[in-house]
Amino acid sequence: MPKAAAGKTSVRQPGLVLTDHVFDVPLDHGAPDGERIRLYGREVAATRAREDLPWLVFLQGGPGSAAPRPVGRAHWLDRVLDDYRVLLLDQRGTGRSTPATRQTLPLRGGPEAQAEYLAHFRAAAIVRDCELVRAELTGGRPWTVLGQSFGGFCAVSYLSYAPEGLAEVLITGGLPGLDADADAVYRAAYPRMERKTHAHYARYPGDEAAARRIAEHLAGREEVLADGTLLTPEAFQQLGILLGTGDGSHRLHYMLESAFVPTVAGPRLSDEFGEQAAAVLSHAANPLYALLHEATYAQDGHVTHWAAERVRGEFPEFDRHFATGGPFLFTGETVHPWMFRTHPALRPLRRTAELLAERKGWGPLYDPERLARNEVPVAAAIYHDDLYVDTADSLRTARAIRGLRTWVTDEFEHDGVRTGDGAVADRLLRLVRDEA
């Protein structure tokens, strides 16, 4: 059992009561009497919620992202608080849980010790954490899981290894390929990135020339952003991660249109552009995203070996073809070894990242046989041409999980649960309850 901290603190927002929960859980669930780490969860309840409402735990996307920080009954919370008490769990290493950053990881020792420590931060460990927390909060009663993106990956692991803890599962933009390794994931991802880039240029035709101008400028003169990020053409390409979100194409357009200012040294990238780019590209708050992203696909002992970088070589159109007249293509959710040179929050973790990229012995993430016998009600929103999660993989997985009900939609992008004002959560609840 986890050890809950004494003296829980509650505060109020309009329509909400927020209560802090802190738990100590094993770092290694295979050694429950060994080292322990802290988990933080924020309970969210409507002001006059019934005490007997069932629990819903929200698992955030990532990996490496803290749970949302609510401000009132906004978005999906407004819908689910009618039916649940909600736990916004900061998954291990994130938010107010025991942190794992460039500042804290050296406390573990050198890169070898850091990599060994981080090997305990994948979906299987998060599921085991949830089971310990569930036993404490619900008295052993099953709860509902709402998993967004990587949180959906964790939910499928939950269905594989601890379905007895689940009353219902809601997944949004997070049905993984059950047997897709990192190479296969990126082999499918690069063509999506190209489609998303061309769709953006179709919406904002002037942006192709604007992006080319920035890339050509950076090819001749790398710029250092205010936070210390070295902006290269390849780093600039990664602003394409915005193209997978509901308002991302518009945000990217506004960034590009104010990219340059005149200076005594000639045209330079504006501080306005640099500040916005740094906010998108920074990994200061979530270095686990870069350190563990490819490991979220690693199974059966496979080494990831910088999959996104290797597979990119199969798609030369993403190289500097803009210099010879080809289109400038943005990339999306990819991690590359050069990021541990260009991003200041990642530089101290370069060797740790290399060790994780070469790590062998990753265990299984899912149990296809158990999923085929699933008895837990499950509903999933699958976003048409999702930039981050391959739609074809999601549909295959949907067919492989017994009883799973799907909603395939082009009304929203990958972050639909956040931007849909409760529509996505409402549709999933109706699906899982067989009301839609």
Image (spheres, grey):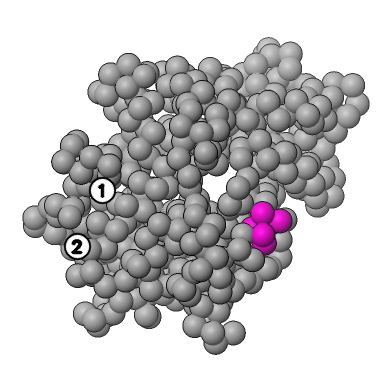
Mark 1 closeness class: few <14, some 14–19, many ≥20 residues within 10 Å: many
Task: Name the residue rendered at 37%, 18% in the picture.
Answer: 111
Task: Name the residue rendered at 33%, 33% in the picture.
Answer: 100
Answer yes or no: is residue 110 visible: yes
**Amino acid type of disc 1?**
Leu
SS under mark 2: helix
Determine which of the numbered discs, if any, sits on residue 25 in the image: none
Q: Which segment is the magenta one? A: 391-396
Task: Name the residue rendered at 65%, 16% in the picture.
Answer: 222
Instruction: Give coordinates of residue 113: x percent, y percent.
Output: 32, 22
* Residue nearest the viewer, comparing 337 with 307: 307
**Identity of the residue furthest to the right in this view:** 325
Residue topped by disc 2: 136
Is 326 on the left or on the right of 111, as rendered? right
Answer yes or no: is residue 425 visible: no
Picture layout, residue 408 above or below residue 338:
below
Q: Quadrant of residue 50?
A: bottom left
- State yes or no: residue 280 in magenta: no
Instruction: Give coordinates of residue 398: x percent, y percent.
Output: 61, 64
SS under mark 1: strand
